[in-house]
Amino acid sequence: QNLLDRPRNRPVRTALGVAWLSFYVVSLIGAANDIIAVRFHVSVESVTWAVRIGLFVVPVAAYALTKRLALGLQRSDRDKVLHGRETGIITRMPNGEFVEVHEPLSQEQLHVLTQHEQYKPIGPGVGDATEDLKIAFRLARRLRSWFSESLYGEGAQIAKPTVQEYQVLHKEPTEDHA
């Protein structure tokens, strides 16, 4: 049993980790600004200003880039599951079109690409509360729903292919023998 997730299957969590690491690296550069200034023959003030700006810009850019990369890898995994592995064999169709032959993946490869759990975001929900706590509970539920949507919502993951999508593309026979 696999206990760990592939980083591409958790794009937001991976992007948050990369953003934190980039913040840490920029902070380390800021701690050594005098050495960097002497080594590269620039002023200490310019290194300090670069670090000040970098502390805000670099983590955001790293987050966006990492999330896009992870979603792109998820998209390529989905295409690989649905269409199979490229064989490198090019055939010409009767209408003159050239297509590359794809080979279906083995069951082990399909399992690796589709075994991860895809969670659904939590809705805002409803609940009973006293008048004093009603506003606080409503705000907490809204905040929880927003966090859940950003972690597991539509833009945070690529949906795994369903069995029906796979069967339609591979034209597997159904179990009906009647």
Image (cartoon, rainbow, N blue to C red):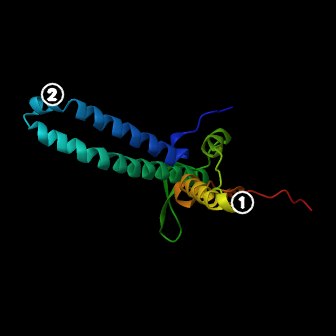
The quarter in which the N terminus is drawn is top right
Residue 101 visible in the shown view: no
Of marks 1 and 2, which one's residue comes earlier in the chain? 2
Element marked by disc 2: helix
In the rendered image, residue 148, in percent from the top left (x then y), is placed at: 59, 54
Q: Is residue 97 above or below residue 6?
A: below
> Residue 111, labelled with which disc?
none
Hey, which residue is sitting farthest front in the picture?
132
**Residue 14 on image: x %, y %:** 48, 42
The residue carrying pointer 2 sits among few (fewer than 14), some (14 to 19) or many (20 or more) residues within 10 Å by Cα, namely few
Label ID, residue 35: 2
Residue at coordinates 50% horizontally, 48% vertically from top-left? 12
Which mark is in front, 1 or 2?
Answer: 1
Q: Look at mark 1 in the image and give the residue it sits on.
A: 130
Q: Quadrant of the C terminus?
A: bottom right
Quote the CA–CA distance across marks 1 and 2: 60 Å
Decide which of 9, 43 is in the foreground and name it: 43
Name the image quarter holding residue 121: bottom right
Inspect the image, locate mark 1, and give the three-letter code of the amino acid beneath it: Thr
Picture quadrant where residue 154 is located: bottom right
- Tell me if 85 is positioned left or right of 45 in this view: right
Residue at 20%, 44% in the rendered image: 50
Q: Secondary structure at mark 1?
A: loop
Left or right, 132 with respect to 93, comes to: right
Which residue is located at x 71 percent, y 62 percent?
A: 126
Task: Tell me the residue at 34%/35% (across/down).
Answer: 24
Residue 102 is situated, as x and y percent measured from the top left of the image, at 56, 52
Give the residue type at disc 2. Answer: Ile
